[in-house]
Amino acid sequence: MLPYARQSVDEEDVAAVVRVLHSDFLTTGPEVPAFENAFAEYVGAPHAVACSSGTAGLHLACLALGLKPDDQVIVPTISFVATANCARYCGADVIFCDVDPDSGLVTAETVSEAMDRADRSRLKAVFVVHLSGAAVDLARISSVTKAAGVALIEDACHSLGTRYDIEPGRQGLVGDCALSDFTVFSFHPVKTITTGEGGMITTRDPEAAERLARARNHGLIRSPEDWVEKAMAFDPVDGEPNPFIRQDIATLYAPAAASRDALPPEAVVSMQTWRSRWQ
Ligand SMILES: Cc1ncc(COP(=O)(O)O)c(C=O)c1O
């Protein structure tokens, strides 16, 4: 019987995972930017943002585009359901686009035909899927999307390492975003490389890369100089961060720590939260 997937994991891979397991960070540690930088360099894009799956990457791309209810997007009829679902997560309506019956890929003609069925004032993005390592004709499709003023997102979950024609005589690697706004990859074990579960989004737009990086982690911003509400984030007297959590809640609950059985459940939760953050 043909296996669904047979990943190749060697001793060097195992050693790399063990190294992380022995380190201080099991998530969002220094291995993540190292992977992002290596990935961006390989595909030839200036920005790569790692996330938890290809599905999450497609969803993040939709969020970075600002997709909202009543917007429309075009999605190929042949793909994994995640390509359409990610737009639905934002409330956008999906218009399905035919594929070439021989290749399974959308073409400039089928995209144009789907655009004719869309409400042009609501249409915000076209998704193309590079199916099983075969690239769509991005050069012709991107001229259609550019003329219509809509975003182009490449679902390259199957296609890390695929080359495509940027223009006659000039090739690029899928993910370089020479002709699109975002390219999304999956690292599920049936894909070209695997991290167990995982995904990556590449883009040439530095602001979009920042939006992606923020959205993948609940909008949390770690560097105080980038905090938006500085007045709320720092104590005006001593300049220390988060006065509400550090002083008010902690001061309220800390004396009760010795007799936590007497506290209401919500107070225990708050106290534990304070401990995990500040102790
Ligand atoms: C074309 C396509 N897009 C998106 C995804 C979603 O990727 P993930 O499984 O990493 O969420 C897949 C997964 O099979 C896929 O085949």
Image: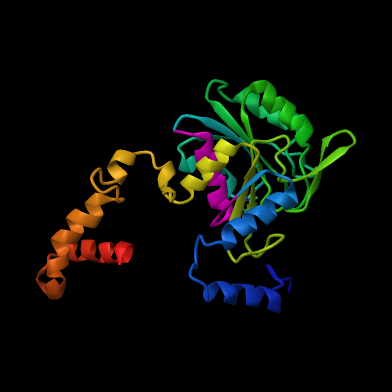
**Where residue 192 sits in the image (x, y, percent)?**
72, 60
Where, quadrant-wise, is the C terminus in this rendering?
bottom left
Along the horizontal axis of the image, is 46 left or right of 82? right
**In the displayed image of the protein, which residue is found farthest to the left?**
262
Q: Which residue is nearer to you in this view: 111 or 232?
A: 232
| Rendered residue at 24%/56% (across/down) | 246
Numbered marks: total: 0
Whether the magenta-drawn stretch holds residue 62 is answered as: yes
Q: Which x, y percent locates residue 199? A: 60, 55
Q: Is residue 1 above or below residue 35?
A: below
Q: Check the image and report above or below for 109 versus 220.
A: above
Rendering quarter of residue 193: bottom right
Front-most of residues 58 and 108? 58
Magenta region's main secondary structure?
Answer: helix
Question: Does residue 178 sit above or below 222 in this rendering?
Answer: above
The residue range painted magenta reads 49-68
The image quadrant of residue 128 is: top right
Farthest right residue? 169
Ligand 1 resides in the quarter of the picture at bottom right
The x and y percentages for residue 276 are 31, 66
Q: Can residue 12 be seen?
A: yes
Q: Nearer the viewer, residue 252 or 44?
A: 252
**Residue 102 seen:** no
* 176 relative to 252 in the view: left or right: right
Q: Residue at x 68, y 36 (%)?
A: 180
Residue found 43% across the figure and 51% down from its top: 222
Was residue 237 drawn as part of the magenta stretch in this picture? no
Quarter of the image with the N terminus is bottom right
